[in-house]
Structure formats: C-alpha cells, structure tokens
Amino acid sequence: MTKTKLFALMGASTLGLMMASHAVQAQQSGYLSFLIDNGPQSVAVAEAWVAAYTEANPDVTIDIEVRPGGGEGDNIVKTRLATGAMADVFFYNSGSLFQALNPTQNLLPLTDAPFQANVQDSFKSVVSAGGEVYGAPFAPAMGGGIFYNIPLYAELGLEVPKTWDEFMANNEKIKAAGKVAVIQTYGESWTSQLFVLADFFNVLAEVPDFAEKFTANEAKFATTPAAVRGFEKLQAVFEAGYLNEDFGAATYPDGLRMVATGEGAHYPMLTFGVGAIAETIPDHLQDVGFFAQPGDDAAKNGLTTWMPDSIYAAKTTSSPDLAKDFIGFIASPEGCDIRNEAVGATGPYMIAGCELPADVPPAVSDMLPYFAEGGQNAPALEFLSPVKGPALEQITVEVGSGIRPAAEGAALYDEDVRKQAQQLGLEGW
Amino acid sequence: MKQRTSIIGGFAAIAATFVVFVIPFLFIILMAFKDRQQSALRDFSWPNGFHLFDNIFEVVKTRNWMMITAFINSTLITVVSVTLLIVFAAMVGFVLARRKTRFNGLIEFLILAGLMIPPAVVPTIWLLQGLKLFGTLHGMILIEVAYNLPFSIILYRAFIATIPRELDEAAVIDGARPLDVFFRIVLPLLWPVTVTNIVVQSVGIFNDFTNPLYYLPGNGNATVQLTLYNFQSQFSTAYNLLFTNILLITIPPLIVFLFFNRQIVAGMTAGAVKG
Amino acid sequence: MTAAAAPALKAQRRSLYPSWFYAPAAVIYAVLFLAPTFASLYFSLTRWSLSSAVFIGFENFAQFFREPFLIQGLVNTVVYAAISSGLKVVLGMLLALMLTSQIMGRGYLRSVIFFPVLVSTVGVGMTFTVLMHPTNGMINEALSLIGIKGPGWLVDPKLALFSVALVDVWKGVGLATVIYIAGLVAIPKDYYEAARIDGATPLQNFFYVTLPLSRPATATVITLSFIGGLRTFDLIWAMTKGGPGFASDTVASVIYKQYQAGFYGLSTAGNVVLFILIAVLVVPLTMFLNRKQGFE
C-alpha cells in the first residue's frame, strides 16, 4: 500500500474512519522471509525498512536472512531459486546477473504493481525479461571510478585528471612524494575488476555499438583496441610500481581505509564504498573525493554507471500480495528517506520523488554532475548485455599483478565469456 | 653419553614443536583477548587489557545469535549421524567379517569405491531436492552417514576379525536372536573400535565444511564451519572477533582430545594399520 | 530398528549373520552416493539447470579441457597431492622414530603434533592466511628480525600452491605420525636384536629393518593422504580460493567455481574428470602398495 493511495483513502473517509486509519494501514498481515547480502549497509538498511514496515503493519512478521556477497552469494541465490527454497523477497544484482537467474521461471512479475509508475524506465530495462518487470531498486545508482584522497591532492597541488595521461602523471608525483599512488586489494579478488569495468564509458565513446555486437558474438574484447585499454591500464599501474606493497593480500576494507586516511591516493571502486567509509571511518568521510576513470580524450570524459541492485520476489512465495506491498514500500519516497537516515546517501535515486539530503559527502557530490544535465555517463556493460564471464576477477588479478599481459588477459576473458554465453544458450554462440 | 644426547634432542624437539605447532594456537588465543585496534596489528603481542568475554559476547550475538543456532545444528548433525554410522557400520562389518558369500567381493569393492570416488555434488543436490531433503538437517545427516560409512565399516570389519567366532556361536546355542546377539554381545565387545569411530567421525563431521557448503544452504541451517566462513567478510576488519570465533569452534575438538587422547592413538592405529 | 527386527523373531534357524544387516547401510549408501554417482555420468553430458537438462554430448568435457586453467588445475592437483603426501610420509616417519625413542617430553610432543588433526580446516586456513600475510604476517615479521625478507607466501603465484600444501602438512602430519608409531611398535624386537648381533649401524637398522617392516603403515599413510590431497578443497578455498588468479586452482576448486556460476552440467563433468583422475592414479598405487605388503 503506497502512501498516496493511503492519503486518498483517508481523504474520502469520515472522521470516524480517520480515527480508524491505523486499522486501514494495518490491513497487511502474514509472514515474509527476506534474504539480503551481508554488506553492513544492506543489513542496516534492511533492518530499518523491516522495523518501519512492521511498525505500520503490526500483523506482519519479516525475518531477515543474511547471505555472503560475491560469487558465494550468487551461488546461494541460484541454488535456492533452482531448488524452490528461495526466501519470499530478496536483494540481488540487476543486469546480466539478474538475467542469469532464469527470471521468467523463478521470479514473480511486478510489472503491474502500482509503485512501478515511479521507477525510472532505465532501471526497469535492467530487471526485465520476456516483457515483464521483476524488480524494484532498493539503492541509489552508483558510479564506477576512482576515489581519491582530497588532502593529499591539496598537499601535492594536484588536479583531478581528465585523461589517462594526466592520471598517470599525478601518480608519478604521488610516488615521488613517497606515497602509494594506486591502492589495489586483490585479497578480495572482485575489487580487481574496476579498472576494466569502469573503463566502459571510454569503450562506448569510441565504439558506440560495442555492447550489441558483443552480445551477438561479433565484437571481442581482445580484438577491440578500446576494450583492451582497460586491461592495459590495469597492467600499467602495476608495472609503474604505483601499487601498495601488500596489494595481493589487502582487502576491500583495507583499501577504503587507505584512501580515506591518505595512506594511498587513488582507489578504483564503485561509489557504494562511500557508505562503508561513512560507517567505518566517519572522521575521514570529507577527505574522499571521486572522479570517473579517465579515457584518452579530455573532451570525452564521462562516468561508467551502475544501476542499483534490485529487490525481487520469488515465484514460489506463498504471500505474493504482501511481498509486492513490502517491495512497494521500499521503492517509495518514504523508503528512500528511511535509507538516507539509516546508511546515508550514496548517489542519485531511480525513483521519482526520492530526494538526496542537502549535505552529501564529497565523493557523492563529485559524482552528481555526471548524472546532471550536460553531464556524460553510460551504463556498465553488464547492464547492456546479458553476457558476463564468471572468471573476470581472476583474470584481472592476473593482469593486475603482472602474471599475464593485458592482451592475453583480454583474450582469456573472451574465452570465459563464450563459455557463459553457451551455458546460457544464447543465439549465435 | 646417550642420556645427554637424548636430553639435548628432547629440548630441541620441544623447542621446535613449540614454535611450529604451539605458537599458531597461542596466536589465536592472544588475538581473541585483544580489542579491535590492537588486533588490527596482527602481531604476536601481549593483549592490552582483557577483552575475551566482550569478544565472545560480540561473536555469539552477531546476526541474531546465529552462533547458537550453528552450535545446536552442528551438534545435532554430529551426534545423530555418528550414532547411525556406528550402528549401521558395525552391522555391516559384523556380517561381512563373519559370512563369506560370493557377494563379499562386490561389497568390498563398493566400500573402496566409497573411499575413493569424489561425491557427485550437483546430482546429489538434484536428488535431495527430489526427496525433499535438500537444505534440511535430515538430508545433511544422511549425507554424512553415506559418505563416512566406508571408513567406519573398514575399521569395524578389521576389528571383528580379531574376535573369536565362538563367542557369538555360544550365544546362539543359548537361544538368542541375531539382533540380541549383535546388540548384547558383539557391539559391547567392539567398544575400543567404537571409541575410535566416535572420535574420528565426530571430529570429521563437526569440522566438515564442504558438504554443508553444498547441501545445507540457509541461515536456519547454519553450521559452525559455515558460520565462521560467512563471518569472515563481516569480521574482515575485526580480527579479534574472527579469532574469537576460531577459538570457540576449536573448543569441542579440544574437549574430545582431552578425554580420548590415549584411545585416539591406540584405536586409530589399530584400525588403520590392520585395515 | 525394532520394527525391522520383527521378521527375525521366528528366524531361529536362519543365519546368525542375516543379510538384512546390510540393508540400512546399503539403502543410504545406494540412494545418496551410488545413485548420484551414476546420474553424474548422464548429467555430465547435458546443459543442465537442475529443472531441465539438454543433452549436448561431450561438449562439457570439450569445454572443460578448453578451459585454459584446467590443465594447470590438473597439474596443480597432482603436485599438491604428491607434495603433501610425500612430506607427510617423510616427516611422519621421522617424528614417529623420535617419539618411539627414549626422548623426553614424549607425551607433550605427541599431543602437540596430533592436535591440529582435530581442528577445523577452515579455522586453520584463516589463521595461516593471517600469519602468511606478506607485509603484516607474523611469519614474515619473524623472518625480518633475522634479516630475511619473507616471500609473499599466498600472493606469489609460484608459491601459493606450495604454501597451502605446507599448511596441509602442518595440519595432517600428526595423523601420519600416529599411524607410523603404531607400525613401528608392532615390529618385533627380535629383528633389532638380530641386527644388533650382526653389528648393524643405526642407519642400517633403519634401512634394512624399520623401513621394510613399516611398509603397511607407509601404505596407509600414502593412500589416505594422496586421495585426500587429490580431493582437497576446503583448505584451498579458505586460503586462496584458487588464486592469485588461477595459480592454486585444483580440480575440486574448478568444479566448485563452475557450480557457483550455475554451470551445473559443466561442474558435473568436472566431477567425472576428478573421478577418472583419482582412479587412474590411485588404483595402480594401492595395487602396488598392497602387492608389496603381501610379501611380508
């Protein structure tokens, strides 16, 4: 039940009915299980939503289950869907990972749910399959790019780079000053993919139809120079010796800590890292800025964006109406407000009526111009194509630690992609 | 002269094993006593202050007291599956050692196959799902029984071969039924190898990580090993909690060790070498 | 159980060793182990989503062997199994010799060597991951005290697999030792007496008496640890997840990754490959070890 509907009901009602509005609001009852990933943000915001929703609907019980993130989490979600043991509602990625869930068979369509009217079409497109919409955004949009330490930039008199050469020149100065220029954290291998994934705006700037051709098995990473650039950039920062000494063993929290406290200058990451910094190192939140991964041409500087993760309902749920109502609550302006309060604002929302608070951290305000009028952005490849190889993170660890040259890494990834496309049974592979 | 070398050798051995085997455990214990800041250094230092109880409380209450659920589940799985293993394996071992038929060769082949063949994971999931056992404790228990039967049977068969046949035959003349003979006479005689079975299998099943990872998804079904694994990312900046968790799940094996130290060595070797 | 016992009531004349004693074990084993094993032979030939399977012939196997890291993974698996079981044989024998001699502190020594066997593999893996951290780990900090710059145990692609194998040995050598102790204790004293009369040196004693006569123990240690090494998953997964990159991938971790990615048919094909690998290596090995044992 959305708020607007509730107001309409209340407006039409008599005083007596208004006094009974609590009863109207509490019409939902029943039980939902709710599976979320174990990121501290997900846990905090899910708990806040459940608390608010069950306060408004005292007859509803919602149990939060927590799963690990990354490949481990993908596995749990897939297995539980395939075995019919999925929770009623759950968080999961949108885009290609969503397509791999076999949505038409496993998920409850939410196309006609009233809350979809407020959801942006660009988001709907990444949670749709077979003409139905299956998800609703539960987080703001993100950018993939590079966090930088603002005090360190000020101290060394550096400017935010618009081209890759400027970026490397900055790195050289930072290294000369005895600091870590680029932080990498291959102890958690998923973090190694950023230089490749976040370079996609630059790929599209040169090859606008790369995504379609890639999906159709016509364009390859290894044979598209613009697409190999991402791998080359990864190799370049390693070979120049810009990385932190323990890059092979450091973890994601290490990386955030280093860029926030100025132990290192740059950390390629998705902007959701802002939330984790706010949570674990709040004193340094104001010290972290953000810029898009620069390409070769300053005139074509733009941000690779990530659609937010989505909340879905399993087709096997025994209370579909309650599940839809709960999802609608999360995807409402009220839900956004609760999120802002619980974990802070990390980027622009995909829901009409959701507002960012005035005092966002610098890393978020640095990102907003790319989304605003006249700014340039493009979605990451995984939102334009269902094809995404599962071994990219191992390959980028190899390229990023000098085990495998960039060109070979790109070719190997093409192999991995082919395997996934064949397993998905896509046309033309 | 000989005396002296053995003393020197003894000291050297004690020092070397202390460094190699004891220090890692001391490291775990020290880390579990530290607070978050100090544990972040990950060094071998004396804790500043006593934080063990705070850490334990913190670990246990994480994710809605999941640790408690996990301990209950792991204990249930371990106790029930070891009980079933002992009864079923002893029955097979008893008949296998006593009665020679043309099927013995096939049975022994199946037992060896069970020791060697890696379980076919995904088909097992598919089958468990068909039996409505996937992701349930019953299913997990039956899996543990199926996978560990061969080893238990081998231990039992080897041991039963050393018990004189006259004992069970004497019982029959007294008019006892097979099941009585087995439970009243044979099984008690097997106590030494049963202890070995209990120790080896309970430790193995309690510490099992791979099978619950595959067959037992879901929070309600958490086991202690999976809980530790899943907490790893949550505790990635809190090494004190990570090591407190490791310390907690090391306690049950420690108890087993303290109680059964002698029997483990005696029984394990008896079974292993004869088998 | 008691209900099943009812038919046996009037079975006075039936065998004391009734065949139905096999039944409970046989049912569980057949349903949960044999059936999936046979099913895997079929599903490894399909593209499979658990709910539907499309027959694609040997495509999965072709894919599996095209997987550029699989060859590496196969080699890694064998290397890992050989190193860990080899070291367990050598160290287990040496430790057992030490513990059966008149050394002081035997009880303590045996306890500390054996205890890691009982501890959670995942816990051990996590502990050593912290201890082996390249810059912050205790091992390298201790090495730097004596002026050695320690290697990147788990992050150097050339070392990662060996480091994990070393931890495997650390955890498993206690079991090998205990098996050897039993083997050594079982050697009749007369042999040593005879050797002493012949004037044998301690080294001759070892090579001509101890080593041949502890062959059953050696066979047990090799078989147990070699099969264990080939199937190893939990330690590798807890320490490196097959990384850095693919440097410490084994067949078992490759299987798990395919499963994780939802490629169930492919994962099952990997299972069949692992099964064949074990059969090809272990069957001749055990036949060799047992044949020798027969001579004794």
Image (spheres, coloured by chain):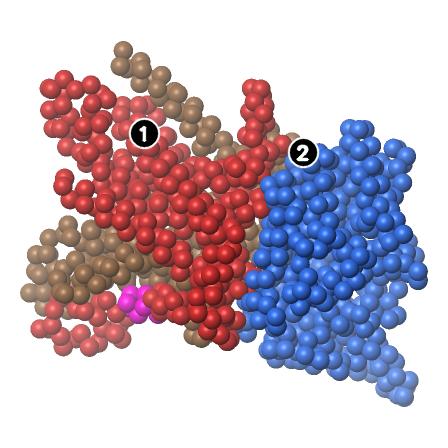
Chain colours: A blue, B brown, C red
For mark 1, name the chain.
Answer: C
**Residue C94's mark?**
1
Query: Can the viewer see residue B237 in this picture?
Result: no
Toward which corner of the image does residue B77 lie, by quadrant?
bottom left
Q: Which residue lies furthest to the top in this view?
A: B1
The magenta region covers C24-31
For mark 2, name the chain.
Answer: A
Toward which corner of the image does residue C210 lie, by quadrant?
top left
Question: Magenta includes C28?
Answer: yes
Query: Can the viewer see residue A358 in this picture?
Result: yes
Question: Is disc 1 in contact with disc 2, using a CB cutoff of under 8 Å?
Answer: no
User: How far across and how far down the image is residue C50, in percent?
Assistant: 50, 72
Relative to the observer, which residue lies in front, C140 or C21? C140
Type of residue at label 1? Leu
Relative height, residue A24 to residue A234 (above, below): below
Q: Does residue A394 appear left or right of residue B163 in this picture?
A: right
Relative to the observer, which residue lies in front, A427 or A343? A427
Question: Magenta includes A354?
Answer: no
**Residue A245's mark?**
2
User: How far across and how far down the image is residue A321, in percent?
Assistant: 70, 81
Q: Alpha carbon of mark 1 to alpha carbon of mark 2: how far? A: 39 Å
Relative height, residue C199 to residue C131 (above, below): above
How many residues crowd around disc 2 within 10 Å: few (fewer than 14), some, or many (20 or more)? some
- Residue in the picture at 62% in, 33% down: C136
Q: How many labels does the image show?
A: 2
Of labels 1 and 2, the one closer to you: 2
User: How far across and how far down the image is residue C58, in percent?
Assistant: 44, 66
* Label 2 element class: loop
**Residue B35's mark?**
none
User: How far across and how far down the image is residue B208, in percent?
Assistant: 44, 53
Type of residue at label 2? Glu
Are both tags, 1 and 2, on one chain?
no
